[in-house]
Amino acid sequence: MLNLQTLRSSLIVSCQAYPGEPMRDPQTTAQVAQSAVIGGAAAVRVQGLSDIARVRSAVEVPIIGLWKDGHDGVFITPTLHHALACAGAGAHIVALDGTRRERPDGLSLAQTIASVHEGSNALVMADCGSAADAVAAAEAGADIIGTTLAGYTGERPKTDGPDLELLAEIAALDLGLPLIAEGRIHTPAQGRAALDAGAFAVVVGTAITHPATITGWFADALAP
Ligand SMILES: CC(=O)N[C@H](C=O)[C@@H](O)[C@H](O)[C@H](O)COP(=O)(O)O
């Protein structure tokens, strides 16, 4: 089982392309992940079973795997079936919806996490949208708390950058679990600020691995 202490204060890079996009291809994801590792990523976060499997054979660093199914409500690794499949594909850590919302398979978060632990060697990262989610996820047995869903569940405003206020609030609760900052970290300074707010590690996706969005930032800034 993965020793999480190896990820302390580290950069984790999320390598994802969205349905219909030109870079949506497991080989491309693997090449992006390899490039991230060359740049200093201590772990990578990868969506989809084929991408997880391909990246697993391409890099040595730990993989946080997830399976997005749908766009609304509970869609990040929504059921136990999805979670076990991510572990089976090679994820060292399975990221799943860690909110208090009802899950499509009717299982509780605690039942889901216990079954992932029973059925695999993977750790579980609970993608949360609020401090109340984080408390519930810790009680449910999560190994890692993530702020991935802050600004996407209606409980928190969608801040321009990372939700530093939420990070500080969760850190102050001392839940005894690594707290990973994720979501809208767009600059190195914001990553540093997330650590300073109490994060154990930082996930950056879009600002490193989504060229269409990054190009849009520049194009918008140059527009007359
Ligand atoms: C809300 C949601 O669906 N988040 C997803 C979770 O895996 C990804 O689309 C994000 O890219 C990832 O969380 C990293 O965040 P950012 O790309 O903002 O650095």
Image (cartoon, helix red, strand yellow):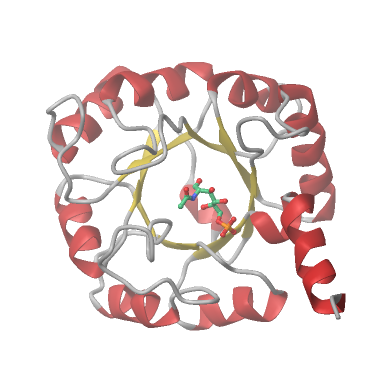
User: In the image shown, does 19 or 95 lie closer to the viewer?
Assistant: 19
Question: In percent of the image, x 44 and y 23: which residue is there?
Answer: 87
User: In the image shown, does 43 or 98 lie closer to the viewer?
Assistant: 98
In this view, 10 is above or below 163: above
Q: Residue furthest front?
A: 224
Question: In percent of the image, x 71 and y 52: which residue is there?
Answer: 41
Q: Residue 53: image x %, image y %?
A: 62, 19
In this view, 164 is above or below 147: below
Q: Quadrant of the C terminus?
A: bottom right
Q: Quadrant of residue 172?
A: bottom left
In this view, 115 is above or below 38: above
Q: Residue 69: image x %, image y %?
A: 41, 29
Residue 76 seen in the figure: yes
Residue 120 seen in the figure: no
Q: Going by the image, does 148 lie left or right of 81? A: right
Question: In percent of the image, x 83 and y 70: which residue is there?
Answer: 218
Q: Quadrant of residue 45?
A: top right
Q: Residue 1: image x %, image y %?
A: 45, 33
User: In the image shown, does 104 or 172 lie closer to the viewer?
Assistant: 104
Question: In percent of the image, x 50 and y 32: which residue is there?
Answer: 92
The number of numbered badges drawn on the structure is 0
Q: Going by the image, does 22 lie left or right of 87? A: right
Q: Going by the image, does 135 lie left or right of 69? A: left
Q: Going by the image, does 123 lie left or right of 193? A: left
In this view, 62 is above or below 171: above
Q: Residue 25: image x %, image y %?
A: 73, 25
